[in-house]
Image (spheres, rainbow, N blue to C red):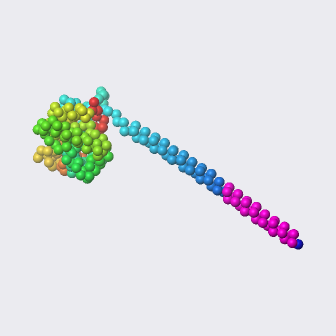
């Protein structure tokens, strides 16, 4: 009887050990399975991340391709008019330009032009880019797709300051614009249309294109009302193929802007995209 009890005790003990070992092996197998599945999950995650990265790179390549703009126009240095580079292109075109930006009305003017799908160059002054609010205005103009031009830091008559001061007026503004939007201006317009030997040298060094204008009226007292301004801008005898049209950051110009663009189009003139103008 005692032998049977001892045998039974040993049997139960051995059975318990086997069950425990089987349980441990099962848990170990589950752990190994979990580790495998976890590693597999990490590998799948890495593969997904790599696919996302490749997709992002593909989109970047497409984006870069889209950013390459075909040059279609040039500025005639004899009269500042815009004209097609190739024969057969539409030459009933105009170039819209807005000086003294970004003062009070430039952003609203840009939004109006954007809605009308009309391109323009905003020629900026450095004294309008001194606060964070001013800089944000410039960023907005750029983000809306408009070309940013150089109109000097302080709008001086370039013939009345020294050569070094002229250089600073142009280069410091280029530096400031680049700091704000990441691009240097391609176009330059001299205050009062006064171009000097020094300014021409600096423009060439900066790989820019200088331009004056064909006509503009919004600084004349009799045209400081939206209706009168719109009428003269579209009915002037100076309107012709390639006209380089000058406007300013003014309230009456803002209010006349839509009528000016629609009036030009009714006469068959289409505003060009300045990004398509070569500076060569």
Q: Nearer the viewer, residue 190 or 236?
A: 190
Magenta-span inclusion, residue 5: yes
Q: Quadrant of the N terminus?
A: bottom right
Magenta-span inclusion, residue 51: no
Residue ID at (86%, 72%): 2
Q: Nearer the viewer, residue 139 or 115?
A: 139
For residue 30, say whether it is visible.
yes
Q: Position of residue 47 (x, y in %)?
A: 54, 46
Residue ID at (78%, 66%): 13
Q: Nearer the viewer, residue 266 or 90?
A: 90
Residue ID at (25%, 40%): 174
Task: Give the extent of the magenta segment.
Answer: 2-29
Q: Residue 239, located in which quarter of the rendered image?
A: top left
Q: Position of residue 149 (x, y in %)?
A: 24, 40
Q: Quadrant of the C terminus?
A: top left
Prevailing SS of the magenta stretch: helix
For residue 249, say whether it is visible.
no
Residue ID at (13%, 37%): 162
Q: Position of residue 234 (x, y in %)?
A: 19, 41
Q: Residue furthest right?
A: 1
Q: Residue 56, located in which quarter of the rendered image?
A: top left
């Amino acid at each position: 009887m005692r032998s049977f009890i001892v045998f039974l005790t040993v049997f139960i003990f051995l059975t318990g050990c086997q069950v425990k070992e089987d349980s441990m092996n099962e848990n170990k197998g589950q752990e190994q399975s979990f580790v495998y599945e976890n590693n597999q999950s990490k590998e799948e995650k890495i593969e997904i991340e790599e696919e996302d990265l490749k997709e992002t790179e593909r989109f970047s390549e497409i984006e870069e391709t889209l950013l390459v703009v075909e040059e279609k126009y040039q500025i005639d240095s004899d009269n500042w008019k815009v004209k097609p580079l190739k024969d057969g292109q539409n030459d009933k075109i105009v170039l819209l330009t807005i000086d003294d930006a970004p003062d009070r009305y430039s952003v609203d003017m840009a939004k109006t032009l954007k809605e009308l799908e009309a391109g323009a160059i905003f020629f900026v002054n450095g004294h309008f880019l001194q606060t964070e609010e001013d800089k944000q205005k410039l960023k907005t103009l750029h983000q809306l797709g408009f070309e940013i031009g150089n109109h000097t830091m302080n709008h001086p008559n370039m013939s009345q300051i020294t050569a070094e001061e002229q250089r600073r007026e142009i280069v410091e503004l280029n530096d400031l614009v680049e700091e704000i939007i990441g691009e240097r201006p391609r176009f330059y317009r001299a205050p009062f249309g006064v171009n000097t030997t020094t300014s021409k040298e600096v423009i060439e060094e900066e790989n820019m294109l200088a331009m004056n204008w064909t006509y503009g009226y919004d600084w004349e007292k009799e045209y400081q009302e939206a209706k009168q301004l719109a009428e003269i801008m579209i009915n002037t005898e100076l309107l012709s193929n390639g006209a380089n049209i000058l406007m300013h950051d003014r309230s009456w110009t803002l209010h006349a802007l839509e009528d000016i663009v629609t009036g030009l189009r009714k006469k068959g003139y289409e505003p060009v995209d300045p990004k398509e103008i070569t500076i060569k």
